[in-house]
Image (spheres, helix red, strand yellow):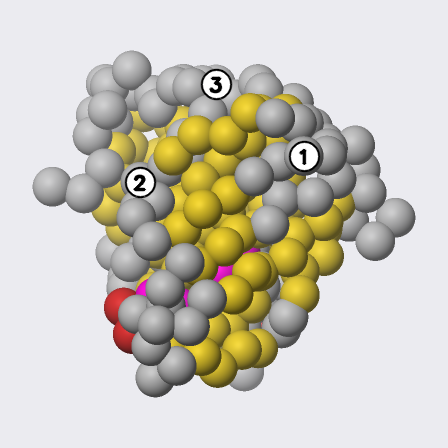
Amino acid sequence: RKEVEQDPGPFNVPEGATVAFNCTYSNSASQSFFWYRQDCRKEPKLLMSVYSSGNEDGRFTAQLNRASQYISLLIRDSKLSDSATYLCVVNPGGFKTIFGAGTRLFVKA
Amino acid sequence: NAGVTQTPKFQVLKTGQSMTLQCAQDMNHEYMSWYRQDPGMGLRLIHYSVGAGITDQGEVPNGYNVSRSTTEDFPLRLLSAAPSQTSVYFCASSPGQWEQETQYFGPGTRLLVL
């Protein structure tokens, strides 16, 4: 079993739709969680950290469920510019960060 | 600030050749790391450093060496290139050793080993 698993997609949604991604992690001792965004042939960039209480940044909402060991990302009112690959990132402790393989999102006009 | 820079952008090697991928950051970050990204695999940690003079292995260190003689630079050396090392390589840095710190990535080096 991979340490961090994501549905690879692709998710194809129309503009204005709401879309949600889930990510599961295997190490119950994991301490910190992030969502990164990666555009085609570009470097990953931090989208948002994921806090225990959940957090929101504009149209993006991240949730953490420690009991079930998953994190989620909800995107409301999708824009064409949201088309990208979304990477789930987990730090199980120490200095080694684990990246999921990513979920591809295509937003269509 | 230039952030994290990587050179070269693209490289083609023959099997058995050696080369060094350069990475530099101008943000005075303590933590630096190297990842490789392969289709369907996500980013995998090769080596990392928590400060000048300190390096350690990540998930896939075989075939790679690193050193950290300055805070700014963290080169990755391929000792004897193999086709399995064809990949996109990203260098990243973060401000400190704390787990919650954001990682800033360089633009990547695309390597093809024939």
Q: Nearer the viewer, residue A53 or A76?
A: A53
Segment tinted magenta in the rendering: B85-90
Q: Are marks 1 and 2 in contact (CB under 8 Å)?
A: no
Q: Are marks 3 and 2 in contact (CB under 8 Å)?
A: no
* Residue B28 against residue B107 in the figure, above or below: above
Subunit of label 2: B
- Which label sits on residue B59? 2
- Residue A102 as seen in the image, left or right of residue B22: left
Using the rendered image, report if marks 1 and 3 lie on a common chain.
Answer: no
Q: Can residue B86 be spotted in the picture?
A: no
* Residue B109 x/y as whole percent: 56, 67
- Residue A29 as seen in the image, left or right of residue B55: left
Subunit of label 1: B
- Outermost residue on the left side: it is A1
- Which label sits on residue A53? 3
Q: Quadrant of residue A23?
A: top left
Q: Nearer the viewer, residue A86 or B74?
A: B74
Residue occupying the point 53% across, 52% down: B76
* Residue A24 x/y as whole percent: 25, 38
Which of pointers 1 and 2 indicates the residue nearer the eye?
Answer: 1
Amino acid at pointer 1: Ser
Q: Quadrant of the N terminus of chain A?
A: top left
Using the rendered image, report if marks 1 and 2 lie on a common chain.
Answer: yes
Q: Earlier in the sequence, mark 1 or mark 2?
A: 2
- Residue A23 as seen in the image, left or right of residue B51: left
Q: Please identify the dominant SS of the magenta region.
A: strand
User: What kind of element bears circle 1?
Assistant: loop
* Residue under label 1: B69
How far apart, in angstroms, are the residues tagged by discs 3 and 2? 31 Å
* Residue A85 x/y as whole percent: 45, 62
Q: Quadrant of residue A92?
A: top left
